[in-house]
Each structure stands twice: as C-alpha cells, then as structure tokens.
Amino acid sequence: MVFVCLSLFLLLLLKPEPSAAPQESQIRDTIAGLSSASATHFDILFGDRDYLMLRSRPELKGVSAKFRHDHRRIALLWLGELHRDVLVVWEFRRFLVRNGLPVTFREEVSIGCGACFALAYLNVLQMTVLLCGPFVFTGAVRSAKSPVERLSGQGAGLLSRAPDAVRAQLQSKWTQHVVAWDLG
C-alpha cells in the first residue's frame, strides 16, 4: 500500500507541465550534441524477418550467425548512443543552471528521476541484447528511445522559458560547450 501511494505521489509530482514539451524538431535544434539515435527505419535495423529467413535455410547457418552478431553489435551501439544522449541532456541541464536559468525543485526531481529511469532502462536493455540477442525483445528495444526523448523534451522545456535574447546567448554558449566537451 505504501509503495502504491509513493508511486502515485511520484507520478503526480513528475507529471510534465503542458508548456514544457516542445516538438522533436525544437528539441533537436535546441539541444546541440544529441546524436541522431532515433531510428527512422527501425524494422530494417532490428526486425527479425531476415534473420528468421536466413536461419530457416541450413546451408546459410553461418550467414545467419554473422547476421545476428552484426545486429547485436548495431543494437548495442544504438543503445550506447541513447545512453550518451541522456548524459548530454543531463549536462545541458547543469549548463543551464550554471548560467543562471532558475529551475524549480519539481523540475530537478523530474529530470533527475527521468535520467535515472532512462539509464536503468537502457542498461537493462543492453544486458538483454548482449545475453539474448537483438531479436528477442524488439518491442522493448524499439521503446528505448521514449524515455530519452521525454528527458530531452524536459531539458528543452527549461530553455524555452528563457527570454529570446537570453535563449540565443545560451544556445551559442551551449554549442561552444558541446564542442569543448566532445574534444575533452
């Protein structure tokens, strides 16, 4: 009972504000440094139809094993990029706070919990893909970008509250910060 009450409390506390969810194009334009880890042709990358066809032919057993190995590596690289995106959004939030953008306690808790959830989810998926292969839980792998996109929307929502002049200055400083951060 206590767990249910705590869960409901956290859901109510972490419910995003309506104005804090910009479109994906705004997120990509605002938070420089995010990878293009959103797979547009997800079924081509992670669909199991080709693998099952290869595996059904005994003479192509070696090819199907190589196909599975390569797709496991691709899935792990993609999940690694999503992991990096979470770290970039977290660094973006820190950058905004360091540069004087006021953040409420609710926003801090929401972004902190969102980042922890996204990282935990991505780690579980990475272990699953590593142990079971890329074709076992395709739906779970497909949904891996959802918590990351939600988190990046929250980060971009913080910046959207800033006045236009301040926003332009912060965007310029952030772009320089990302270049320095990637080099470092």
Image (tube, grey):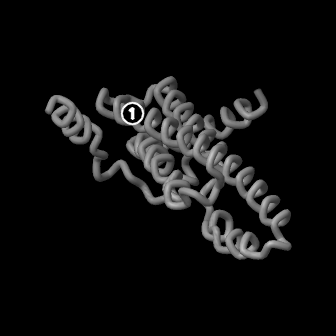
Give 86 or 58, whichever is nearer the viewer: 58
> Which residue corresponds to the image point at 55% horizontal and 48% vertical from the top-left?
30
Residue 40 in the image: x percent, y percent? 61, 67
Q: Nearer the viewer, residue 8 or 172?
A: 8
From the viewer's perspective, tell me whether residue 153 is left or right of residue 51. Answer: left
Residue 12 sits above or below residue 54 on the image:
above
Q: Residue at x 54, y 56 (%)?
A: 137
| Tag 1: amino acid | Cys
Residue 151 drawn at (x, y percent) = 45, 44
Q: Residue at x 71, y 76 (%)?
A: 53
Height in image: 136 above or below 108?
A: below
User: 123 or 118, which lies in front?
Assistant: 123
* Location of mark 1 (residue): 113
- Extreme-front residue of the structure: 58
Name the residue at 31% across, 29% down. Answer: 104
Which element carries disc 1, helix, strand or loop?
Answer: helix
Q: Is 118 drawn above or below residue 23 in the view shown?
A: above
Which quadrant of the view contains residue 52?
Answer: bottom right
Task: Look at the image and tell me whether residue 166 can be seen.
Answer: no
Is residue 54 left or right of 124 when viewed as pictured?
A: right
In this rendering, the count of numbered labels is 1
The image quadrant where one finds the N terminus is top left
Q: Quadrant of residue 45?
A: bottom right
Whether residue 78 is visible: yes
Using the image, determine if residue 61 lies above or below residue 94.
below
The quarter of the rendered structure image containing the C terminus is: top right
x%, y% of residue 154?
42, 44
Q: Position of residue 98 (x, y in %)?
A: 50, 23
Dot 1 alpha-carbon crowd within 10 angstroms: few under 14, some 14 to 19, many 20 or more:
some
